[in-house]
Image: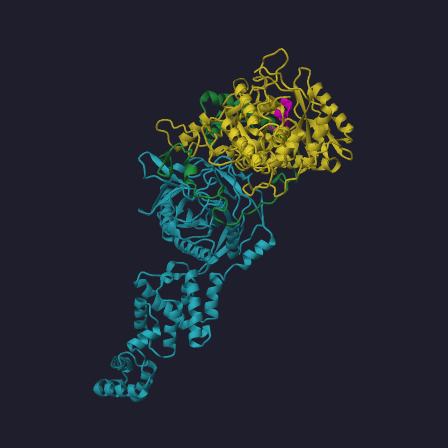
Chain colours: A yellow, B cyan, C green
């Protein structure tokens, strides 16, 4: 029999329900993997084995009592350390929030606990979710379980949800939450051979999630496969009156309607995503994806998203602008770090606390955001960016008049080595070139593992859907998953 | 036209005043959270996770606050914007947990409106004047800092943090402290009528930012200063007086006015520059990405309009036009919504008690309320809302006078007893034997006695010293222990004296 | 548009982030690089385009005026809001003395 830790959400849940193993056994197995890998992978900021066991005991007791079990019953998960968890340190991987213990639970995490999931720990991420490689964490970079053959060079697990992707790929968790602002679920999923979906903006409540860029931030599910993501997303999503941008809509039963047959569906291939200098392997995997979707019965057509090339620049105005304001609350007054130099006044305390508490990338984005909002520049930068954003959104709307979903590569390359591209911020930003447009338009999008590159590193394909059509995205993902037959996993070296 | 001028060494200066008034919206809970808004709670007990800006907290607007701001806008005949937005005003201060205030800069809820201040010769307002209101927007209040509790620390209380405010921004249309005072009073009256703000200035429910500049009449506007958080009508007027004179001194001394934020010191009646706000202001306003545009539908607006009460100007006109009150009495009775409300209940009951139309007893009720009752309450240190005499009891008293059962002077005595004991007027009159004597025979007998005893005065009267008539009335009333019906006394005296 | 050391110092001060002189020097080219890069948006014709307000069509919901309707968004939480405070004193948040 395969190990419990090789199982995904559906298999664990069904096994627990059937009595094949107990929820406590599952929790213990994953707790052990978390502990064993921590030194090497640094995927967790805090491990919470007791929480996982407690939740598992509750599920086992419920089962023994013959009660109905939730959709995630007995499944221990990792929680990106951006979600506030009652009594468990929540840091956003920053020094400024180090030691902060929320007295409240985020809506999304509460929904998962209500569905029977347990908490393995809080997952590492790029500081305040700003980054694409997990190197901006105050608690050290996450190391991908994947390596290039014959090399011990540590690779990135992607970012910002790099702790999540690494934990799933390394079998430290069957699934994990992520958040996606410009690609922070999809890109790490692609880099680690895992699956991740960002739903339509407003599907998952942002209440209790440390904010990076409010108009873009959206929580989502990460796991081994499409079905697991669908199950988990169903448990996470739903209207929340505490979030004014939450969509007041019922959550569809995506899992029940999952089907990999795409007969009658049209898939668009946006020609502007064929960027100059795209590696041949990316090009090839994209072609392969097209072939798989045709095989699944879909008609594939080329579409145009003319403003694609401006998406990154748009994002790097809007996201820092919102972030510069969202992060103003970290001031050393009510929680977190306080740096009070001798004789310092209030404003000196702010400046010292924030200088000490924020990492370089966070500072960079706060400064950019402050600048683009400052007097005289607001219209030229922010208003202009929101107009271009409207055009980008209109591009998608037009494309979706012709097609049901779009297929693109998730990232322009496979995972890179840690330290490889953090010299030039813009080079790092370019990792998000394929994921940012859908974020700007608030669209559901997912990454599915499609194959390995010549070095044996995973590559992912991205599916982007119409607003609220998570089902179409999941189904196309399932069609690829069924044909890609991606079973590769990193060899255990840790 | 205001003739208010500052006399400087170089000539007369005109004062230009604009006011930004922060009025706390009357609501149970805060603008973006469910915590209570009541005044005077223990520090930080009315604070939600949202008001304390904990990580991941989000604002959800309170419908009632929006409704009250819209109703206020309607009460000043302002344009109501069916599409508005909340913006973030970014700055760092210890009383501002989010590091930004959610406000409305680019698209306020309420646009152009106006209010009229009434002529007041004595105060130097020769005629009614319309003061323009540029906008009303909705925003969050900040918390409160306490500086005197600890030698090296200030303490932060967030109870006020997130309470809804309306910022009511006037045009720079005022030209004297008196006009500004009248504007604040009138606005307060309107807010209290609408019920959108309790107007308690001593509790900080209304605070004024006073923008003052001076210029030579006919010149362009000068550079203005803004004095923050002035919390009474008197202080607003003092701020303007002081600030205008200070500016004239600076300008005539060859100096320049710096656009700055100042603080009013009620102890000295002066203003001073605010050190903590000296930083260059760059608030980096942008639309709050946590909140979508606020779109109001017609049904919402209709509901707001339908719920508006009769407003002070209309009420005052009606009191004069329909009830026949003097302009002065109408102004007094409509100056505060509680007074008007008390008066109208009294009027209804007084009319019913005398079987008359309200218009037929309005003058009596108004005169009594203003010249008798207010003074009597005042002596007891009470006001209408704590009055020991109800409108029903007062109506009975007025009916006793109206029907001639007691005289006006006896009514004063009766009122005093009512205030002391809480007893009804009729019972008091009965018990104390205060009923008025209208029996012609009894009065005639007394009149005869008095005329007989004062033959010299009767002679003088007949010689043309008619002012002595009052003397005879007084003597008769005295002899009747005040209980004689004055009208009957008059008639008999007139007949007897010829 | 490009920034110089003085501008970056001013932005850092607005953002309340203390920056040392060498840090400042390093940031100037970095920020200029990013600003030059985002200026490509100038190429896009946005005449007559309204800035985006809501990514997914949605209207702002208003809540009922009820105190503590949901304990998660209600008040009366002094202990919870002070629990992580670096200097909680007598039910207040303490900060270095402010002179107004």
Viewer-side residue, A456 vs C42: A456
The span shown in magenta is A184-195
Q: In the picture, which quadrant includes the N terminus of chain A?
A: top right
Q: Residue B345 lies in magenta, yes or no?
A: no
Q: Which residue extends farthest top?
A: A150
Q: Is residue B173 visible?
A: yes
Picture coordinates of residue A34, whole percent (x, y): 54, 22
Viewer-side residue, B131 vs A414: A414
Q: Is residue B119 visible?
A: no
| A18 relative position to B390: left or right | right
Picture coordinates of residue B166, whole percent (x, y): 48, 49
| B112 relative position to C100: left or right | right
Viewer-side residue, A346 vs C46: A346
Picture mark count? 0
Residue at the (39%, 33%) spot, across then down: A346
Which image quarter: residue A195? top right
Picture coordinates of residue A222, whole percent (x, y): 61, 29
Q: In the picture, which quadrant includes the C terminus of chain A?
A: top right
Which image quarter: residue B413? bottom left
| C44 relative position to A53: left or right | right
Picture coordinates of residue A449, whole percent (x, y): 67, 24
B86 up-or-down from B378: above or below: above
Q: Residue A185 lies in magenta, yes or no?
A: yes
B405 up-or-down from A431: above or below: below
């Amino acid at each position: 029999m395969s190990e419990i830790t090789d199982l995904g959400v559906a298999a664990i849940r069904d096994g627990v329900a059937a009595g094949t193993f107990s929820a406590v056994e599952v929790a213990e197995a994953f707790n052990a993997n978390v502990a064993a890998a921590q030194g090497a992978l640094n995927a967790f900021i805090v491990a919470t084995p007791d929480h996982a066991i407690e939740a598992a005991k509750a599920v086992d007791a419920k089962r023994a009592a013959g009660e109905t079990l939730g959709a995630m019953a007995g499944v221990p998960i990792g929680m990106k350390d951006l979600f506030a968890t009652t009594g468990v340190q929540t840091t956003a991987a920053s020094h400024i929030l180090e030691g902060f213990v929320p007295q409240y639970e985020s809506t999304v995490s509460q929904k998962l606990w209500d569905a029977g999931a347990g908490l393995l720990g809080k997952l590492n991420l790029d500081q305040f979710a700003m980054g694409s490689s997990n190197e901006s964490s105050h608690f050290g970079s996450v190391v991908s379980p994947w390596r290039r053959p014959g090399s011990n060079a540590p690779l990135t697990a992607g970012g910002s949800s790099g702790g999540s992707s690494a934990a799933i790929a390394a079998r430290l968790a069957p699934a994990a939450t992520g958040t996606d602002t410009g690609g922070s679920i999809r890109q790490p999923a692609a880099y680690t051979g895992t699956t991740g979906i960002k739903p339509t903006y407003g599907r998952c409540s942002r209440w209790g999630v440390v904010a990076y860029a409010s108009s873009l931030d959206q929580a989502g599910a990460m796991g081994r496969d499409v079905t697991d993501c669908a199950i988990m997303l169903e448990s996470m999503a739903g209207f929340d009156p505490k979030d004014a941008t939450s969509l007041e809509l019922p959550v569809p039963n995506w899992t029940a309607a999952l089907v990999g047959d795409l007969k009658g569906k049209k898939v668009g291939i946006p020609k502007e995503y064929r960027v100059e200098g795209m590696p041949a392997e990316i090009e090839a995997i994209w072609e392969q994806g097209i072939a798989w979707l045709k095989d699944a019965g879909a008609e594939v057509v080329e579409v145009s998203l003319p403003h694609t090339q401006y998406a990154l620049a748009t994002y790097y105005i809007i996201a820092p602008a919102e972030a510069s304001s969202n992060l103003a609350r970290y001031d050393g007054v009510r929680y977190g770090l306080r740096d009070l130099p001798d004789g310092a006044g209030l404003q000196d305390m702010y400046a010292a606390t924030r200088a000490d508490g924020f990492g370089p990338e966070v500072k960079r984005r706060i400064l950019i955001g402050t600048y683009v909002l400052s007097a005289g520049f607001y219209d030229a930068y922010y208003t202009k960016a929101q107009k271009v954003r409207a055009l980008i959104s209109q591009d998608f709307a037009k494309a979706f008049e012709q097609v049901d979903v779009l297929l693109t590569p998730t990232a322009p390359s496979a995972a890179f080595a840690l330290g490889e591209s953090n010299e030039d911020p813009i080079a790092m930003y370019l990792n998000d070139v394929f994921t940012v447009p859908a974020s700007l338009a608030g669209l559901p999008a997912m990454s599915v593992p499609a194959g390995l590159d010549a070095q044996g590193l995973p590559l992912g394909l991205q599916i982007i859907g119409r607003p609220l059509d998570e089902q179409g995205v999941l189904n196309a993902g399932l069609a690829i998953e069924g044909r890609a037959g991606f079973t590769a996993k990193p060899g255990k070296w840790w | 036209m205001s003739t208010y001028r500052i006399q400087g060494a170089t000539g007369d200066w005109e004062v230009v005043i604009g006011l930004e008034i922060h009025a706390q919206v009357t609501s149970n809970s805060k603008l973006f959270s469910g915590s209570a808004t009541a005044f005077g709670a223990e520090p930080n007990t009315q604070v939600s996770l949202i008001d304390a800006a904990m990580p991941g907290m989000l604002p959800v607007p309170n419908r009632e606050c929006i409704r009250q701001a819209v109703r206020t806008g309607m009460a000043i005949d302002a344009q109501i914007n069916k599409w508005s937005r909340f913006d973030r005003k970014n700055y760092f201060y210890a009383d501002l947990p989010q590091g930004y205030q959610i406000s409305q800069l680019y698209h306020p809820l309420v646009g152009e409106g106006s209010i009229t201040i009434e002529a007041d010769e004595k105060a130097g307002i020769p005629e009614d004047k319309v003061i323009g209101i540029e906008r009303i927007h909705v925003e969050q209040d900040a918390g409160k800092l306490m500086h005197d509790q600890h030698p090296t620390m200030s303490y932060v209380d967030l109870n006020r943090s997130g309470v809804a405010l309306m910022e009511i921004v006037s045009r720079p249309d005022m030209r004297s402290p008196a006009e500004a005072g009248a504007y604040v009073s009138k606005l307060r009256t309107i807010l209290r009528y609408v019920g959108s703000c309790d107007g308690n200035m001593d509790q900080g429910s209304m605070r004024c930012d006073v923008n003052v500049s001076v210029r030579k009449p006919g010149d362009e506007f000068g550079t203005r200063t803004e004095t923050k958080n002035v919390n009474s009508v008197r202080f607003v007027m003092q701020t303007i007086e002081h600030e205008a004179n200070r500016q004239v001194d600076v300008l005539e001394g060859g100096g320049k006015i710096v656009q700055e934020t100042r603080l009013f010191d009620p102890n000295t009646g002066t203003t001073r520059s605010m050190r903590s706000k000296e930083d260059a202001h760059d608030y980096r306003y942008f639309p709050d990405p946590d909140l979508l545009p606020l779109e109001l539908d017609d049904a919402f607006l209709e509901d707001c309009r339908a719920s508006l009460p009769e407003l002070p100007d209309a009420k005052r006109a009606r009191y004069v036009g329909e009830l026949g009150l003097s302009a002065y009495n109408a102004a007094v009775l409509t100056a505060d919504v509680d007074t008007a409300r008390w008066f109208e209940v009294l009027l209804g009951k007084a009319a019913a008690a005398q079987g008359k139309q309200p218009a037929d007893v309005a003058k009596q009720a108004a005169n009594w309320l203003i010249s008798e009752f207010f003074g009597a309450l005042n002596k007891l240190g009470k006001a209408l809302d704590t009055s020991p005499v109800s409108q029903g009891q007062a109506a009975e008293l007025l009916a006793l006078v109206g029907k001639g059962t007691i005289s006006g002077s006896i009514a004063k005595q009766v009122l005093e007893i009512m205030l002391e004991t809480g007893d009804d007027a009729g019972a008091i009159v009965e018990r104390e034997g205060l009923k008025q004597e209208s029996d012609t025979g009894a009065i005639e007998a007394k009149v005869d006695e008095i005329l007989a005893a004062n033959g010299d005065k009767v002679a003088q009267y007949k010689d043309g010293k008619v002012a002595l008539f009052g003397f005879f009335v007084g003597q008769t009333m005295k002899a009747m222990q005040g209980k004689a019906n004055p009208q009957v006394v008059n008639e008999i005296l007139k007949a007897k004296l010829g | 548009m490009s920034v110089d050391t003085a501008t970056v110092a001013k932005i850092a001060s607005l953002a309340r982030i203390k920056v040392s002189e060498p840090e400042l020097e390093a940031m100037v080219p970095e920020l200029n690089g990013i600003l030059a890069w985002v200026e490509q948006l100038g190429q896009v014709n946005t005449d007559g385009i309204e800035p985006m307000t809501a990514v997914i069509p949605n209207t702002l919901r208003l809540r009922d005026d009820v105190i503590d309707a949901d304990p998660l968004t209600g008040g009366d939480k002094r202990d919870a809001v002070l629990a992580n405070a670096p200097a909680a004193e007598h039910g207040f948040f303490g900060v270095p003395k402010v002179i107004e």
